[in-house]
Image (tube, rainbow, N blue to C red):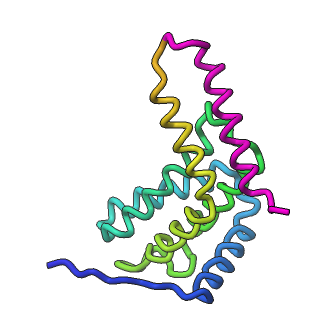
């Protein structure tokens, strides 16, 4: 038998989660990027190996694209965007967060909720990166121009879209 539970967060609930995220960013400010990434990867592994709910496991699996965006040498995420993604991962580097991760059954629930908020905040960056990956995979060897040339052209186009979407309208 399965049980479906729906969770709706009010505007004040979302504000509270965002405040907690900002505090987490401050707490890990002096932690090297590699350690933050490693902690986020470990969180995904723990969720999968500890028999977390399907919901939690699926949500935490979304962390992978954030890590890939940072580590993909061909994507070359600009420093400002890398900082935004790294700051988003900061929450997952702290096991003693809103609900301590070691509490069976619910310890990763806050992390799963936070992933959803992070993905909403970074939807432009994630969408651009997904478009880049699709473009990269669709190109066949021998097509006009070198791989480096057509990747650079697409990357510049998509990085420009990210910057334009983030720029406040006048």
In magenta, the rendered stretch is: 142-170
Name the residue furthest right: 170
The image quadrant where one finds the C terminus is bottom right
User: Which x, y percent locates residue 111?
Assistant: 50, 71
The one of 11 and 77 positioned closer to us in this rendering = 11
Residue farthest toward the left in the current orientation of the protein: 1
User: Where 115 sits versus 18, above or below?
Assistant: above
Question: Most extreme residue toward the front, as rendered?
Answer: 170
Q: Is residue 108 left or right of residue 39?
A: left
> Where does the N terminus fall, quadrant-wise?
bottom left
Residue at image position (63%, 64%) is 121
Residue 9 location (% of width, % of height): 51, 85
Q: Residue at x 55, y 57 (%)?
A: 39
**Residue visible at 43% across and 64% down?**
59
In the depicted structure, whether residue 144 falls above or below residue 27:
above
98 is higher (above) or lower (below) than 153: below
Residue located 48% across and 23% down the image: 139
Residue 116 image offset from top left, x and y in percent? 51, 68
Task: Report if residue 39 lies within the magenta region.
Answer: no
Q: How many marks?
A: 0
Instruction: Give x and y (percent) for residue 169.
Output: 80, 62
Question: Could you tell whether 137 is left or right of 118 in the image?
Answer: left
Name the dominant secondary structure of the magenta segment.
helix
- Most foreground residue, 7 or 46: 7
User: As drawn, is 27 to the left or to the right of 142?
Assistant: right
Locate residue 118: give its quadrant.
bottom right
Residue 160 belongs to magenta span: yes
């Amino acid at each position: 038998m399965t049980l479906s539970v729906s969770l709706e967060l009010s505007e004040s609930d979302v504000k509270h989660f965002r405040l907690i995220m900002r505090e987490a960013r401050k707490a890990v400010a002096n932690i090297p990027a590699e350690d933050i990434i490693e902690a986020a990867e470990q969180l995904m592994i723990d969720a999968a190996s500890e028999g977390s709910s399907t919901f939690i496991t699926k949500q935490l699996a979304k962390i992978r694209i954030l890590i890939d965006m940072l580590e993909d040498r061909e994507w070359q995420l600009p420093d400002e965007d890398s900082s935004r993604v790294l700051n988003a991962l900061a929450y997952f580097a702290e096991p003693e967060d809103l609900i301590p991760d070691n509490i069976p059954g619910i310890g990763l629930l806050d992390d799963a909720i936070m992933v959803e908020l992070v993905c909403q905040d970074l939807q432009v960056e994630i969408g651009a990166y997904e478009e880049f990956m699709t473009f990269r995979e669709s190109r066949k060897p021998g097509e006009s121009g070198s791989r480096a040339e057509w990747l650079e052209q697409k990357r510049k186009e998509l990085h420009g879209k990210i910057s334009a979407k983030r720029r406040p309208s006048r």
